[in-house]
Image (cartoon, rainbow, N blue to C red):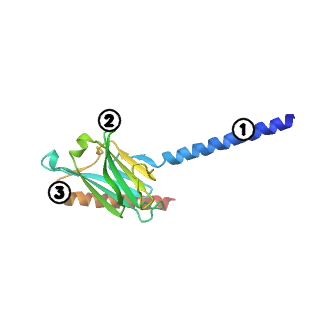
């Protein structure tokens, strides 16, 4: 009788241990897909996001440019993305982009003043190509910003802004190739 109780308690303990480990692993997997993109240069899971500002004579004529690059060797192979503007205190949200096809290079231009009322921006990346209900769909990767990153450079001409994006992309490629050589 004591042996049966011992076996029962041992099995129960092992089952609970396995359940807790699986639960912890699932939570880590969910959390690892949400990133805080605090800087004007971000890269994770084959997605690069660059921010820059095309400065106008007034705030109303300044434009925030966001470049999203989907790497060809992207293991997750994201096909679609969305963008939400949000207010951090009222939790109100406004969809800016709903389910746009993710190309190799994507440029988003937002008026600088649009960040006064709705400061935050959240990018959602999906592996699926077609999504019917974006509000309830869980993204495969999420990158959120509290506002325009403080490190986003400002340029007076579009040519200089585009040259900056190309330079940042080359620098990231150089760093990645150096890391791969070291591995």
Q: CA distance from mark 3 to mark 1?
A: 66 Å
Q: CA distance from mark 1 to mark 2?
A: 45 Å
Tag on residue 5? none
Q: Which residue is mark 1?
A: 13
Residue occupying the point 32% across, 35% down = 90
Give 98 or 123, whichever is nearer the viewer.
Answer: 98
Q: Is residue 60 left or right of residue 79?
A: left
* Mark 2, secondary structure of its residue: loop
**Of marks 3 and 2, the one in the foreground:** 2
Q: Is residue 170 left or right of residue 137?
A: left
Mark 1 nearby-residue class (10 Å; few <14, some 14–19, many ≥20):
few
Tag on residue 157? 3
Mark 2 nearby-residue class (10 Å; few <14, some 14–19, many ≥20):
few
**Of marks 1 and 2, the one in the foreground:** 2
Look at the picture and state if 7 lies above or below 57.
above
Residue occupying the point 44% across, 52% down = 139
Q: Earlier in the sequence, mark 1 or mark 2?
A: 1
Q: Earlier in the sequence, mark 3 or mark 1?
A: 1
Tag on residue 90? 2
Q: Are marks 3 and 2 in contact (CB under 8 Å)?
A: no
Residue farthest to the right? 1
Residue 7 image point, x, y percent: 80, 39
* Mark 1, secondary structure of its residue: helix
Q: Earlier in the sequence, mark 3 or mark 2?
A: 2
Give 152 or 24, whichever is nearer the viewer.
Answer: 24
């Amino acid at each position: 009788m004591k042996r049966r109780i011992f076996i029962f308690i041992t099995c129960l303990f092992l089952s609970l241990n396995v359940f807790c480990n699986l639960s912890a692993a699932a939570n880590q997997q969910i959390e690892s897909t949400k990133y805080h993109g605090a800087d004007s240069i971000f890269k994770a899971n084959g997605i690069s996001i660059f921010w820059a500002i095309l400065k106008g004579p007034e705030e109303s004529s300044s434009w925030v440019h966001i470049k999203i690059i989907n790497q060809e060797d992207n293991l997750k192979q994201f096909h679609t993305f969305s963008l939400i503007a949000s207010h951090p205190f009222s939790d109100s949200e406004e969809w800016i982009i709903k389910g746009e096809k993710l190309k190799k290079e994507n440029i988003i231009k937002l008026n600088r003043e649009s960040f006064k009322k709705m400061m935050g921006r959240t990018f959602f990346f999906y592996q699926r190509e077609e999504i019917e209900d974006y509000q309830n769909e869980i993204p495969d990767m999420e990158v959120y910003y509290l506002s325009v990153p403080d490190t986003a450079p400002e340029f007076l001409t579009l040519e200089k802004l585009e040259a900056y994006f190309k330079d940042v992309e080359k620098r990231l490629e150089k760093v990645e190739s150096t890391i791969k050589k070291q591995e």
